[in-house]
Image (tube, rainbow, N blue to C red):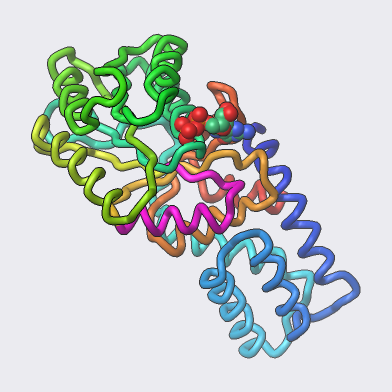
């Protein structure tokens, strides 16, 4: 239900536009495909992915000679499920911890630029893990931003989980190392470590992230067990640019797409996972502590097409 509500704007934009494209038309022709291409691009599906979808429908039209417009919704649904399935082949329908080889806590590094909803997503995720009975610590390794450490602590208090910080302007890699140690020493099930979202240059980003990653690995050789990139769905093409920068800078293993409730451009989910071959794990559908959902490709497509 939250998902339907969260995707309402995308759904209305997407569905209504496609209905407009095929209104008064019996068969899928050149003109329908051109207009469909526009709809997909305006929904921020992304150029490459849009072309892929259009070409696939084109070859189907070429093969079958006639494709009725009444079939277009179903065809698109199948195409999108197919694209999502390639990179989201595993459907987690619960807030499971990333697998940890051997013993010890799961270590999750959270990356992304400022303002995308990184802190909120960490708080929501911590809440879900806590609800499952896991022992959670949040590590404040975004030490550059005045509000970041304080905000994270507020979330830790709200959730009722542990919090590790060395204050502001301290070495983020040291905080990441010590949070991991803290998690081991205190029998935590999971440490969620916030990192600085400074995207000044790609080289610096890469240097910073690899330093943090190395220090976590030093504290626990199998860590990190997940590198979660948080992206803001309302920023469309910017989200795609950020995904490019971060996937080049480090091994991103999962995506969280926030603010889907605030945009008609939820199509960005399809383009990003297709382009960067990283699974979407979570979607944010509101500001509240409960407004984080596990991404499920079938539920997502069902919500899109109503
Ligand atoms: P950070 O700078 O990346 O840590 O961003 P914050 O976590 O502070 O979030 C920035 C703003 O986005 C805040 O006002 C959040 O309440 C809001 N926000 C985060 N996630 C969502 C979401 O899924 N939906 C909506 N509507 N707002 C969100």
For ligand 1, which image quadrant applies? top right
Q: Is 191 positioned to the left or the right of 3 in the image?
A: left
Above or below 187: residue 222: below
Q: Is 5 positioned to the left or the right of 107 in the image?
A: right
Q: Residue at x 43, y 42 (%)?
A: 113
Residue 144, position as x, y percentages in the image: 34, 31
Q: Is 33 positioned to the left or the right of 84 in the image?
A: right
Q: Is 156 positioned to the left or the right of 283 in the image?
A: left
Q: Nearer the viewer, residue 112 or 32?
A: 112
Q: Residue at x 32, y 56 (%)?
A: 202
The dominant secondary structure in magenta is helix
Residue 189, position as x, y percentages in the image: 25, 21
Above or below 74: residue 255: above
Above or below 131: residue 33: below
Residue 271, position as x, y percentages in the image: 52, 61
The magenta region covers 230-248
Name the quarter where the N terminus is drawn. top right
Q: Quadrant of residue 166?
A: top left
């Amino acid at each position: 239900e939250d998902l339907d509500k969260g995707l309402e704007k995308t759904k209305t934009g997407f569905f209504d536009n496609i209905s407009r494209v095929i209104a008064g038309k019996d068969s899928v022709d050149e003109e329908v495909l051109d207009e469909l291409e526009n709809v997909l691009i305006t929904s921020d599906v992304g150029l490459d992915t849009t072309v892929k979808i259009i070409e696939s429908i084109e070859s189907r039209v070429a093969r079958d000679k006639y494709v009725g417009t009444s079939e277009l919704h179903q065809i698109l649904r199948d195409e999108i499920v197919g694209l999502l399935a390639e990179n989201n082949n595993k459907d987690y329908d619960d807030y499971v911890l990333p697998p940890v080889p051997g013993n010890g806590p799961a270590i999750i590094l959270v990356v992304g630029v400022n303002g995308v909803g990184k802190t909120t997503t960490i708080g929501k995720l911590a809440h879900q893990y806590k609800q499952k009975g896991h022992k959670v610590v949040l590590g404040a390794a975004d030490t550059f931003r005045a509000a970041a450490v304080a905000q994270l602590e507020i979330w830790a208090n709200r959730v009722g989980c542990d919090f590790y910080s060395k204050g502001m302007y301290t070495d983020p890699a040291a905080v990441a190392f010590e949070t991991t140690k803290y998690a081991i020493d205190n029998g935590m099930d999971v440490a969620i470590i916030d990192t600085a979202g400074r995207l000044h240059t790609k080289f610096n980003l890469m240097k910073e992230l690899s330093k943090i990653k190395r220090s976590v690995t030093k504290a626990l050789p199998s860590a990190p067990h997940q590198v979660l990139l948080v992206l803001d769905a309302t920023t469309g093409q910017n989200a795609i640019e950020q995904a490019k920068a971060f996937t080049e800078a480090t091994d991103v293993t999962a995506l969280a797409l926030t603010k889907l409730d605030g945009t008609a451009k939820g199509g960005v989910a399809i383009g990003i996972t297709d382009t960067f071959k990283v699974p979407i794990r979570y979607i944010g559908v509101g500001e509240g502590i409960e407004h984080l959902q596990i991404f499920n490709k079938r539920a997502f497509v069902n919500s899109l097409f109503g």
